[in-house]
Every structure is written in structure tokens, then in C-alpha cells.
Amino acid sequence: MINVSVVGATGAVGKELLLLLEKSTLRINKLQLFASEKSVGKYIYFKQKPVRITSLCSTSFEKDDIVFFCSSSKVSTEFVPIALRKKALVIDLSSAFRQKENIPLIVPEVNWKNALGQKLIASPNCIATIISLPLSLLHQKYTIKRVIASTYQASSGGGNKLLSRLLEDTRAHLEEKIQEDSIAFNAYLHNSAHDADGYSEEEKKIIFEVKKILDAPAIQISVTSVRVPVLRAHSIALNIELEKSFSLAQIQKDLKCISGLKERSNLTQAEFATSQTASQKNDVFYSRLRKDTSKDNCLEMWVVGDQLLKGAALNAVQIAEKKIEKKDY
Ligand SMILES: NC(=O)c1ccc[n+]([C@@H]2O[C@H](COP(=O)([O-])OP(=O)(O)OC[C@H]3O[C@@H](n4cnc5c(N)ncnc54)[C@H](OP(=O)(O)O)[C@@H]3O)[C@@H](O)[C@H]2O)c1
């Protein structure tokens, strides 16, 4: 039996994480839930029992075996060191530690060996996690030269706040209260800060993190991140240039080996994966595998995954389950 804490238990990711923990193989003895001051004193039901939300302090995480951080990077930066001092295994879903050289950035299906013996594990950016499933295999077998990723990201990727805003703006739009900055029925560039080179923080995170997960610094990657008025599940159009020639039939066969990645296509009936297909599903789906007719050795594919699940909470729970199973915590 293990003791577990979840920081950010009321958030878009935290709520999914708790649902997954209820069904997980982890045998939880004590569960502690943390959130901001505004949620302190509220209760969340876990396995039909109410658990009171409390606030973080220097004495939190006493006797914890695992702490999941699903809050801001600021909260992780301050409180992860405290959890580590208390000897807990920490799985951090924020971006606070992802770019640190000695901290593993883990997608279990891709680079599990890097998690062995580690007490702090970073779970990657949602797009990076989702696309690293097909990219890792393609890189192993055909050596990727370049990837161009165009993302279509759901509002829940921006947490509870952006999700509520999409619903409010949609309601306002339908009532003909048109606002200039409405995100309803609107595609817009990812709302993270933009650097002098024109790339957004989100795009830079994806580029850095995919290279780190694949341990492939030489791959050239360019990303354009766009938010679309979708509640959950991110979609990504990938154009992948490979060094070796390939056949689509062989790639289809290769991709079948990746657990958690499923093909969803029927080109004759124009059936392919959508945000609805992937919403609330653990699997990541791909469709529209085709050769880019404008360039040799280039592959096009469409990938969709629920970013709250495989892109965040599920990835974190899978890491925890594997660490506990191997008694590596
Ligand atoms: N959303 C995604 O698809 C996604 C995917 C991958 C990774 N992530 C990462 O996961 C993290 C959580 O994202 P989210 O989308 O779940 O955000 P969110 O919906 O905004 O939730 C944030 C959570 O942090 C809590 N919190 C805020 N200040 C706190 C404090 N001082 N102490 C303790 N808890 C505090 C909030 O509590 P209150 O409810 O009380 O404010 C809430 O539970 C972020 O770092 C994000 O980058 C998100």
C-alpha cells in the first residue's frame, strides 16, 4: 500500500488523474489533495470517500510515496524540492523541470529506461507526448530528418479557465453578443508568449521536448500551434521526412507495434480520427497515412490524442504504475 498526494487536484489534469487513480493498479493507503487557497476546505470524492483539499506548506508530503504535481511551474519549482526531501517519487506534469539536462522526460512506451533509478520524473508537454509515439518508431526504423507539425489544440489544453471561456464565449456568440476577442468558432495562434524569432513558447517546448524524448538532437523540427474551438483532444498534422525509403504498407505494420497507438482510417468512406474519436480515450489515433507527393521519402499523417489523458494524466499514472511494479521508488 502506498501514500499518494496530488497537487492541483481540482484542475483539468488533476481531475482526470484522480479518475485514473481510482481504476489504477496502485493500491492507495492515504491520499492527500492540494489546490489553491480558493479550493481549500472543499471535498473531492475518491472511491466514494470524501477527501478534504488542503494547501501546500513546508510540512506537506510527510510519509508520501508518490507526489503528482499538476499545477503551475511556479508551484512545482517551489514544492517539488520539498517532496524530494521527504523521499517521495515525484512525477511533475508542469514544464518546470522538462528542459533540465539531468531530469528524465518520460513517455513510457518510448524511453522508459531513462526513468530507472530516478526520483523526479517530468511528464512532457501534451503534443510532444502524443506525437512521440509514432515518431519514435519512425526514427528508429527510417531515421527522421525533418518534421513539420501543425497542431489543432483543444481549449482544455489551457486548463479549467480556457475551457470555461470557450463555453462562455460560445454561449455569448449564440446569443449574438459578438465580442472581438471571442474564442468561440475561432481558430487562433497558441496564446503563449512569442519570442523574437516569432515562435511561441508552446512551439519551442514541443520542438525541444520531442528531441529530448527521442534522444535525437539532430532532427529538424518546426511547429505551428493553433487553438481551435474544441473542448478536448489535440490533433496534429505531421509531415515527416525520412532518410530511408518506405512503403505505406510496411509503416502501417510497424506502427501496429506501438501500444496505445491505433489506426483509424477508411479512405474510401473518408473515415478518420477526429477530436471526438479521441476524446476521453486512452489510445492515440492516427489516420490519413500517405506519401507526400511533392517530396521523396516524405510521409504525411494525422494524429489525434486526448491531451488530458495520454498527453498528461494517463502518461503520469503509467509512469507511477511502472515504477511501483518494478519497486523503483
Ligand atoms: N491541460 C492540459 O491539457 C495539460 C497537458 C499536459 C500538461 N499540462 C500541465 O499540467 C499542469 C496543470 O494544468 P491544468 O490544465 O490542469 O491547469 P488548471 O486547470 O488551471 O489547474 C491548475 C491546478 O493547480 C491548482 N493550483 C493553483 N495554484 C496553486 C497553489 N498555489 N497550490 C496548489 N495548487 C494550486 C489549481 O487549484 P484551484 O482550482 O484551487 O485554483 C488547480 O487545481 C500545468 O502545468 C500544465 O502545463 C496540462
Image (cartoon, grey):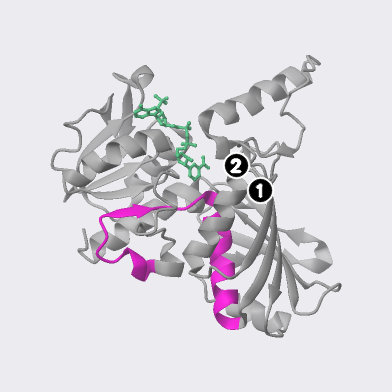
The residue drawn where x is 73% and y is 17% is: 172
Give the image location of residue 177, x and y in percent: 78, 14
Residue type beneath disc 2: Arg
Given residues 41 and 138, the one toward you in this image is: 138
Q: Residues within 10 Å of mark 2 (few under 14, many from 20)?
A: many
Q: Is residue 81 left or right of residue 307?
A: left
Q: Which residue is mark 1?
A: 275
Distance from label 1 to label 2 (Cα)?
A: 7 Å
Give the image location of residue 328, x and y in percent: 22, 63
The quarter of the picture where residue 94 lies is: top left
Given residues 68 and 86, the one toward you in this image is: 86
The residue drawn where x is 35% and y is 39% is: 76
140 in magenta:
yes
The residue drawn where x is 47% and y is 53% is: 124
Q: Is residue 57 left or right of residue 260?
A: left
Q: Is residue 252 left or right of residue 50?
A: right
Q: Earlier in the sequence, mark 1 or mark 2?
A: 2
Give the image location of residue 222, x and y in percent: 68, 58
Magenta stretch secondary structure, dominant: helix
Residue 47: tell me if it is visible.
Answer: no
The quarter of the picture where residue 196 lies is: top right
- Tags 1 and 2 touching, CB below 8 Å: yes
Q: How many marks?
A: 2
Q: Is disc 2's CB within 8 Å of ligand 1?
A: yes
Q: State the SS at label 2.
A: loop
Segment tinted magenta in the rendering: 112-141
Q: Residues within 10 Å of mark 1 (few under 14, many from 20)?
A: many
Q: Which residue is mark 2?
A: 232
170 in magenta:
no
The residue drawn where x is 16% and y is 31% is: 59
